[in-house]
Image (cartoon, rainbow, N blue to C red):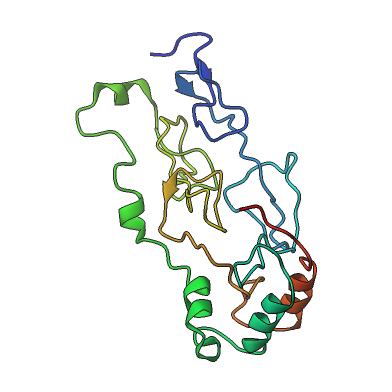
Amino acid sequence: CEYEGCNGCTYGHAVNYDANAVFEDGSCEFEGCIDPSYSNYNALANIQGNAICSNSPLNADFSGDGVVQLEDLLEFLVVYSSEAPDFNGQVWVQDACDITPYEEEVLLEGAGFEEGDPAADCYVNEGCMYAGALNYDTAAESDAGFCVFAGCTDSDAVNYNSIANVDDGTCKYQTCPDFDHNGYIQSDDLLDFLTTWGTIYPE
């Protein structure tokens, strides 16, 4: 089943995707912030590449008028010093910060060969070879392209993940003011918010 010149990266969302590749060889590069100390850390990424790690929120326009200004600061101060899951009873914050993914069983549905599929014979110890995937298999010696990179796949969402290939139900369209995701809205979040002051977001 292996043909010279047919091996390469077969995952279309990788930066080095090879449209001519037939067999996945584990060489895919998924670009993103790989430093977990930053708020935009991407657990699905395996190379830093041109990605920039930052604690600055992707969007802090809470009022939805397209620019970060006084109205947004006032919205933020309403929930300052609050904690999850109540956040001072502010429903919009509860919704924005409640990121609960689909069950793993649902996300992994269809990830693998169907019983009796002859294509399975082309692979030895087949499994997902990428550590960022939900179904990563440390014992895998070959990869048939069934890795599940779970995340938000809607590019209109504030938490869109360009590496994700399976939507996990976590897409949000309002930014959670708990920017560091520690369950508390406090001084660190305020400082992060202030880094976006005056930012104008395109419609």
Residue 146 horizontal side relative to residue 109, left or right: right
Q: Is residue 60 above or below residue 85?
A: above
Instruction: Give left or right: position of 69 versus 135.
Output: right
Inspect this view and state whether residue 132 appears.
yes
Residue at point 75%, 71% (across, down): 192
Up the image or down, 185 lies above or below 37; here it is below
Numbered marks: total: 0
Residue 155 place in picture, x, y as percent: 52, 48
Residue 144: x and y in percent read 40, 30
Which residue is painted at 59% across and 29% down in the image? 27
Q: Is residue 185 visible?
A: no
Return the x and y of residue 179 as percentages of the image width and height. Answer: 66, 71
Q: Is residue 73 left or right of residue 100?
A: right
Percent x, y of residue 34? 69, 51
Residue 200 placement: quadrant: bottom right
Q: In the rendered view, would you say 144 is above or below 62? A: above
Residue at 55%, 31% (x, y): give it.
26
Q: Residue furthest left?
A: 116
